[in-house]
Image (cartoon, grey):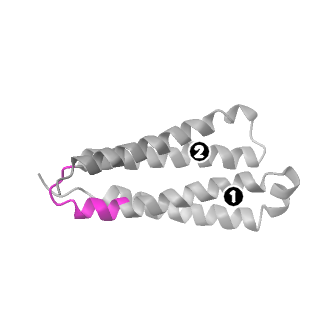
Amino acid sequence: MTAVPSRAPLLAAGLIGLTGIALGAFGAHALKATLVERGMSVVWESAVKYHLLHAIALLALAAWARADTAGTSARLTLWVTRCWIGGVGLFSGSLYWLALGGPRWLGPVTPLGGVAFMAGWLLLALAALRQKG
């Protein structure tokens, strides 16, 4: 088997990192008064925190995938990437939207993003178990 492709998690890390920094800055500057007025600053900050944490995790995943020369975890690595991208969209995305006054029915979407994050971490653990040495 060939080496695990690291392009998907690396590309995701770059894009998610870029958007996380942009949204963090946007919330801290352009939206600061609105978020404070709504009492949603902490919600926005939580969204940014999980957004950026998973960008860093994707970067580490890309490095790990590149080092997996046996390719034993290629499929799981791709699924970890998908789960974490979905988690950012569902978890952080719904929190951003709610902080800006989005419909309250988005509230139940947030835990689905949390489940996607956890599924990605579980798959990462399974990928580690599949590796030799």
- Residue type at mark 1? Glu
Which residue is at the front of the view, 128 or 14?
128
Against 25, residue 126 (above or below) is above
Along the horizontal axis of the image, is 23 left or right of 7? Answer: right
Tell me which corner region of the image, top left, top right, bottom left or bottom right, holds residue 44. Answer: bottom right
Q: Position of residue 121 (x, y in %)?
A: 42, 47
Residue 59 pos. (x, y %): 40, 63
Report the side of 130 relative to 92 (left or right): left
Residue 101, given in percent of the width and then of the height, sits at 78, 44
Q: Which residues are magenta?
A: 61-72
Q: Which residue is mark 2?
A: 91
* Viewer-side residue, 73 vs 31: 73
Q: Is 82 colored magenta in this rendering?
A: no
Circles 1 and 2, Cβ within 8 Å, touching? The answer is no
Residue 68 on the magenta span: yes
Q: Residue at x 68, y 67 (%)?
A: 25
Which residue, as the protein is rendered here, is positioned at the far front? 133
Q: Which residue is mark 1?
A: 45
Count all numbered tags in the image, as a single digit. 2
The CA span between labels 1 and 2 is 12 Å
Q: Earlier in the sequence, mark 1 or mark 2?
A: 1
Point 45% across, 64% down: residue: 14
Residue at x 61% of width, y 59% of height = 49
Q: Residue at x 55, y 46 (%)?
A: 89
Left-right relation of 8 to 98: left
Q: Which numbered circle lies on residue 76?
A: none
Query: 8 and 87: which one is in front?
Result: 87
User: Considering the image in quadrants, where does the C terminus appear?
Assistant: bottom left
Out of 16 and 120, give the one closest to the viewer: 120
